Image: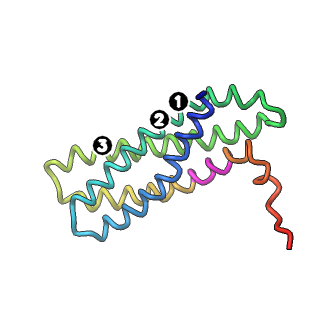
């Protein structure tokens, strides 16, 4: 298994995970259970760990993929820019979640506010995740560039 395989494996986790986290967070806000609210924070921390893995395998994947015919450096650069913003956003959400878990040991009443602010941030970051995934897919999936036509 090379770094391109690892990168593909690890990049799907944060992209899909941020959508799951948003849904879990919405449920947590309306839930009376503080455990569900804390679970959401832990889920964001886990997504941060996956994002680190995806980020650190990106350069190795780039070195492999740029040797393939038809791969444009511009496509790779677009993906890198989107991925960097997604990475930074997810790292901020993960760090705030860790801080929240620490603070909430003594101030449980702040839990709902933490979840609400993280939800707003996660919705914003999920839009960047879509751009990141799409730009990454364009590198190797020519059907994304041309559109898909179904014959009748």
Give the extent of the magenta segment. Answer: 128-135
Q: Which residue is mark 1?
A: 56
**Circle nearer the viewer, 3 or 1:** 1
Q: Position of residue 13 (x, y in %)?
A: 50, 46
Q: Position of residue 147 (x, y in %)?
A: 80, 59
Is residue 124 shown above or below 99?
A: below
User: At numbered mark 3, what does the secondary structure look like: helix, strand or loop?
Assistant: helix
Query: The C terminus is located in which quarter?
Result: bottom right
Q: Position of residue 144 (x, y in %)?
A: 75, 54
User: At numbered mark 2, what does the secondary structure look like: helix, strand or loop?
Assistant: helix
Q: Position of residue 90 (x, y in %)?
A: 46, 45
**Circle nearer the viewer, 3 or 2:** 2
Q: Residue at x 40, y 47 (%)?
A: 93
Question: Which residue is outermost to the right?
Answer: 151
User: At numbered mark 1, what does the secondary structure look like: helix, strand or loop?
Assistant: helix
Q: How busy is the neighbourhood of tag 1: few (under 14 within 10 Å), some, or many (20 plus)?
A: some
Q: Which residue is mark 2?
A: 52
Q: Nearer the viewer, residue 149 or 99?
A: 149
Q: Give the distance between the C-alpha atoms of the residues marked 3 and 2, in whole angstroms.
A: 15 Å
Q: Are marks 1 and 2 in contact (CB under 8 Å)?
A: yes
Q: Which residue is mark 3?
A: 98
Is residue 39 shown above or below 7?
A: below
Question: Which residue is outermost to the bottom?
Answer: 152
Q: Residue at x 56, y 56 (%)?
A: 127
């Amino acid at each position: 298994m090379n770094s391109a395989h690892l990168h593909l494996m690890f990049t799907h986790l944060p992209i899909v995970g941020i959508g799951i986290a948003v849904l879990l967070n919405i449920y947590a806000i309306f839930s009376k259970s503080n455990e569900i609210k804390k679970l959401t924070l832990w889920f964001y921390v886990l997504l941060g760990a996956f994002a680190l893995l995806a980020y650190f395998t990106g350069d190795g994947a780039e070195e492999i993929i740029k040797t393939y015919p038809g791969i444009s450096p511009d496509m790779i650069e677009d993906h890198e820019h989107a991925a960097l913003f997604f990475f930074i956003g997810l790292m901020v959400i993960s760090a705030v979640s860790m801080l929240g878990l620490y603070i909430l040991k003594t101030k449980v009443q702040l839990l709902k506010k933490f979840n609400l602010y993280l939800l707003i941030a996660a919705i914003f970051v999920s839009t960047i995740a879509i751009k990141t995934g799409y730009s990454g897919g364009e590198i190797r999936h020519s059907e994304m560039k041309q559109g898909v036509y179904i014959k009748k």
